[in-house]
Amino acid sequence: MILEALRAALGTDAVFDAAQVAERATSYWSQAPMQGAALVRPRSTDDVAAALRICHAAGQAVVTHGGLTGCVEGAIADPQSVIISLERMNVIEEIDPIGRTATVGAGVTMQNLQEAAREQGLLYAVDLGARGSCTIGGNVSTNAGGINVIRYGMMRAHVLGLEAVLADGTVISSMNRMLKNNAGYDLKQLFIGSEGTLGIVTRVVVRLDEAMSSRNSAMVALTSFEQVTQLLKRLQRELGGQLSAYEVMWGDYFRDVTEPGFHRAPLDRGHPYYVMLEAEGADADADAARFMAVMEGALADELVADAVIPQSETERRTLWEIRENFMALYRRQPIFLYDVSLPIREMPAYVAEVQARLKRRWPNSRCDVIGHIGDGNLHFFVHPGAEGEHLHEQSDEDVYAPLQPIGGSISAEHGIGTEKRRHLPISRSAAEIALMHTLKQTLDPKGILNPGKVL
Amino acid sequence: MILEALRAALGTDAVFDAAQVAERATSYWSQAPMQGAALVRPRSTDDVAAALRICHAAGQAVVTHGGLTGCVEGAIADPQSVIISLERMNVIEEIDPIGRTATVGAGVTMQNLQEAAREQGLLYAVDLGARGSCTIGGNVSTNAGGINVIRYGMMRAHVLGLEAVLADGTVISSMNRMLKNNAGYDLKQLFIGSEGTLGIVTRVVVRLDEAMSSRNSAMVALTSFEQVTQLLKRLQRELGGQLSAYEVMWGDYFRDVTEPGFHRAPLDRGHPYYVMLEAEGADADADAARFMAVMEGALADELVADAVIPQSETERRTLWEIRENFMALYRRQPIFLYDVSLPIREMPAYVAEVQARLKRRWPNSRCDVIGHIGDGNLHFFVHPGAEGEHLHEQSDEDVYAPLQPIGGSISAEHGIGTEKRRHLPISRSAAEIALMHTLKQTLDPKGILNPGKVL
């Protein structure tokens, strides 16, 4: 049987049985025992290829595991699945300070790569909350976003090359290390953001940047969404490309997380919008002077109603906590988290419509909103304020339906996974989905790779 | 016959016959009469779809024309081909200053888009010499590079959404306008850089940036390649991300283009390397002060042997002319132009090897080198200094063969087209090329789209 074949090919220590699988937690988000017929721990691309050849011959479903921090149940396995975990492919093979590239195994964690780059005076610019657990391979498969997209782009912009194994065990090695390479089709794009359904990414070459040495931050309050967009434009223009974060909080969110017992409010709690913003550069004195001049200009022009500038790293962290630690919202249960994108100018009307729909459905519902608005990305925290069945489905309908007429996306950065699969037609046409199926059928005709995800 | 069917579907004025085709020049580079059985000028995506349905049914080969400025004979048609020219799909449909996007027809020229963006205080950051003729659709199909890649990335980084027509006339509309969208497979990647072999791009959404208002430039001389890479790193670090161009000229190139009768040499002609560099920001006074401080530091540390800073726009243009106008090299004929990429640290040894191979083959040969080295991209001008047959093929061998062991690419930014097709195996493995054929077969089973190009 398959377990024996996998053990024969990869070694006994590389293959766990169902009982050993159940000793693991399902994911970062669920402590329930993991399900799976077996879990394979390859040490190399060749190991992955050997495992896939065996599974392919048997028509065996395979689920790939990285750090298991994804938000859309994209790596969930059923009891019949063989899991391939890349946890032992966790070597940083090389950092090239001249070419500014890192070559890594897919199982390297984001934080390990960030730290290795920093030791060389370099920056690996993709960053998000799960940095300690999520892996580079997982970030590739989901085209991870995070907090630096506005300046540095998503994961796709950082992948220069990769190695992937197709469903039948064929190794596609495209380990390009250059910013420019137009020699034929850019095959790596197939594996970025396809959530493990078209191949298993085993090694990656990523772009690094020079580390910045200065940082200036502020939290500001604003009175209209127009001011929120005008301030963003002004900062991107006047800071000469140094803006690295522009995180918007709608007033309700700010008030909820600064209620007594949670964060202390650094600004009056009555404003309609708040923004946490940050710029990074290379000249501490000059950058600070410019940052203050730009902020003073925004205050003088009444673009900003109020502002607080942290005077220490501790104060800065305290401000960021307001944006990043929203545990206050989780007092109310259930709560549903959303990750959508839409054109910036559509945001105020869209948010108002979603909130109105939810209020019509559930008069006591709450809908808190934050966003990486420079990226077109909003996150919603919906508390229906009601009990009963199908709350989540009804909430989905209220959040997703208004996206269709404005060309919005049901997934900005989290992916589709299992959770959003049935909503895909809201954001993609029948012709697009048919072409996705064609690609899937072509690369994985037996449908063994991460079945039930995305499509 | 096909001509009649196309006229019936698109209108008489939309279809030229072979005689009318022959009134056009083959390309930007060749004044020979264009070949083709017909040339179709659609006004809309629906027109393109109608034309492709007719051609698909008949198994008729189709070549798509943009601005015809490509360097690798990627748009060349034979007398049996039907040409689809997107010249009438040249409308800038929308510029969104808040979302910083432009929605354009594929036939819009780069320069028209650059100017339309500038009028709104925005920057369309892709730029290259053929800006007045090349089209956005052509730039997408070839994943254009150019002079701003070091800061802003290639065309692929600027395409947010697109509409393409498949070989059978199916319209794939993926007109996303957001920086983040992970709703299923990113289908647009199939059409970027595949040179019209997988579909015809008809409309595009591109990302814009805020326009910068300050610019500082210098031309410097350096004594070693290590200094060239060290200076690049220092500028990227100390200018806080403002470096927008770093164009290296090997000494032989500099001397050749500054011979009597051509450019005046602004620096002593005896140095091994020269770099034209530029930084763009948003604060004229502060940026100039910092730029001068960084340059003075590089001189003080003897990283740079000599430097000239232009004092006016005219002086700046004069410096750029040394890099951009290499007509001096074309006195010697024949001359072969190359566009390769490789890891930066491999460059000195690679250049030395190519030059040694050429000297062994042709003792009087010359090989001038310039490069966007931050992108890993070198351009060679090879003059074999000999007469006879197969000069180009032999030169190709000397330039391309040494790329294989170092993971270099035979095409950094120009693409493969017809010209580099037979060399593709130097840069891509058999498994990669087989997967490219699989994609081609899946999307264009009759092989009607731009046959003979890339694969």
Image (tube, coloured by chain):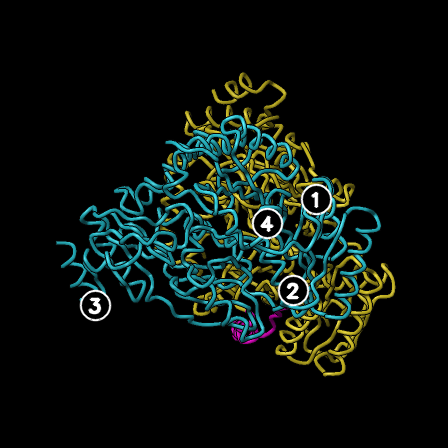
Chain colours: A cyan, B yellow
In the picture provided, is A357 more to the left or to the right than B299?
left
What kind of element bears circle 1? loop
Dot in front, 1 or 4: 4
The span picked out in magenta is B344-371
Disc 4/disc 2 C-alpha distance (Å): 19 Å
Q: Residue at x 41, y 45 (%)?
A: A72
Tell which subunit mark 3 falls on: A
- Label 1 marks a residue whose chain is A
> Is the same chain shared between marks 3 and 4?
yes
- Mark 4 or 2, nearer chain start: 4
Q: Quadrant of the C terminus of chain A?
A: top left
Judge whether residue B21 can be spotted in this image. yes
Q: Which residue is mark 4?
A: A259
Q: Are marks 1 and 4 in contact (CB under 8 Å)?
A: no
Other-residue count near label 3 (Cα within 10 Å), few / some / many at <14 / 14–19 / ≥20:
few
The answer to whether B261 is drawn above or below residue A152 in the figure is: below
Residue closer to the observer: A375 or B290 = A375
